[in-house]
Amino acid sequence: MRIVGLDVEDLRFPTSATLAGSDAMNRAPDYSAAYVVLRTDTSVEGHGFTFTIGRGNELCVAAIEALRPMVVGQDLGAVTGEMSRFWRSLAGDSQLRWTGPEKGVVHLALAAVMNAIWDLWARAEGKPVWRLVADMTPAQIVSLIDFRHIIDALSPTEAEAMLAAHLPGRRERIAMLADRGYPAYTTSAGWLGYTDTEIRRLCQTGVAEGWDAFKIKVGADAADDARRCAIMRAEIGPDRRLMIDANQVWEIDQAIERTTALSVYDPWWIEEPVSPDDILGHARVARAVRPIRVATGEQAANRVIFKQLLQADAIDVVQLDNCRLGGLNEVLAVLLLAAKFGKPVCPHAGGVGLCEYAQHVSAIDYICISGSLDGRMTEYAGHLHEHFVDPVRIERGRYRLTSAPGFSAEILPASRARYRFTIADSAPMKTASGTILG
């Protein structure tokens, strides 16, 4: 099977109109996807995307276009037979890497392309991506990963031994997920732009639907944060988990002070308390606020940053993102690093299509790598799933395992036509509060 074409589309969903997705850093996002379709010399296609929040999505589209010559013409079997080599050829291109060596727009574009490759491979094999990986030997999984710059923390030999240790029991863990599903938490009740009344209503709905864990956005006014956390804690009760998310807006001392002040609401974690690049800052916050956990990773650009966060004991919860990292190959490296350091992985999934990706990542982590559900939950944001061919299914606060071939990344043709962005679409628009954007 040969890749004969790469199509890329700029898709933008107007979530700023309702303030879904709003937080202290991003007040009115429009969930967007730089969307890739890999065409082959057969009827099988591969679909993938990277996630942005509106303006700038066109930059990811342009970066994906720049990768086209390295993808079109490739034989799928040759690519999948040497996946780490192929990944490195894209991530380490000697000219493109100057625009962002394994970070930024070029790395987001790499994620879109690699996720499409995985979708194509899984469709060709007639399996969901989680199953494709679960059917691999430890040596095959290790061969997918570029270990450059992390070998001081995790060698290929050590990674293979870790995978081999969890090889017994894979079948039983798959059966457990099929029977019970994977634990999740909801972000949908606590967006920063929601009113107190809306938070109450959504918490009550979530409790009725069986959710055991809720996240609320903080980082604006301290009094507002306390009031909103009090509302959520009162509505969900003392026994359900409450997490708080500052989306990077605090300084280090401020993060310690504000998290400590909110400790009366018993938060299970504080998410992104400071700049995502500040490893030592995260370490200071973590030492000061534990036993409240520090969670971060949705903006961590690559496996090297995760390595340092883990080596510095700066985080307690690993929140990798399948679009921020360079696709599933680099995700596998971070999953193994997290397992090596004994930290749970709770993937970031607050964005269009991220839940669809994350369900595969969490299943792979449990089945093949960590073998544990202790402290693990996958984020769920209840927006835009209706646009996907294989949308996630949630029952009583748990992800149900998908059996559809691929990476669950394909967006319906009608939705792609409706939300395709052009320059003519860039007129100012109003949010729910009347704020003019653009």
Image (spheres, rainbow, N blue to C red):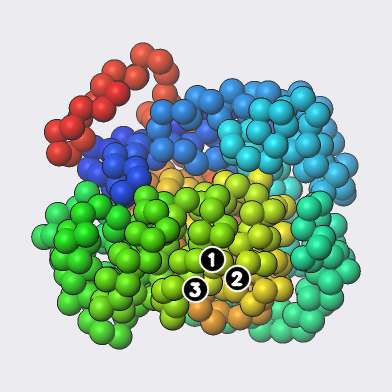
Q: Amino acid at mark 3?
A: Arg
Residue 115 placement (x, y as % from top left): 64, 45
Q: Which residue is mark 3?
A: 287
Q: CA distance from mark 3 to mark 2?
A: 9 Å
Secondary structure, mark 1, is helix
In the rendered structure, are the residues bearing label 3 and label 2 in contact, judged by CB atoms less than 8 Å apart?
Answer: no
Image quarter of residue 283: bottom right
Residue at point 25% right, 52% down?
A: 220
Residue 59 placement (x, y as % from top left): 53, 25
Secondary structure, mark 3, is helix
Q: Which residue is mark 2?
A: 313
Answer few, some or many: residues within 10 Å of disc 2's Cα (few below 14, many 20 plus, some between 14 and 19).
some
Tell me which label, 3 or 2, sits earlier in the chain.
3
Please determine whether, in this image, residue 205 is positioned above or below residue 224: below
Q: Nearer the viewer, residue 51 or 242?
A: 242
Q: Amino acid at mark 1?
A: Ala
View extreme (left): residue: 197
Secondary structure, mark 2, is loop
Q: Quadrant of the N terminus?
A: top right
Q: Which residue is mark 1?
A: 283
199 lies left or right of 211:
left
Residue at point 51% right, 62% down?
A: 282
In the rendered structure, are the residues bearing label 3 and label 1 in contact, judged by CB atoms less than 8 Å apart?
Answer: yes
Q: Quadrant of the C terminus?
A: top left
Q: Amino acid at mark 2?
A: Asp
221 lies left or right of 103:
left
View extreme (top): residue: 424
In the rendered structure, are the residues bearing label 2 and label 1 in contact, judged by CB atoms less than 8 Å apart?
Answer: yes
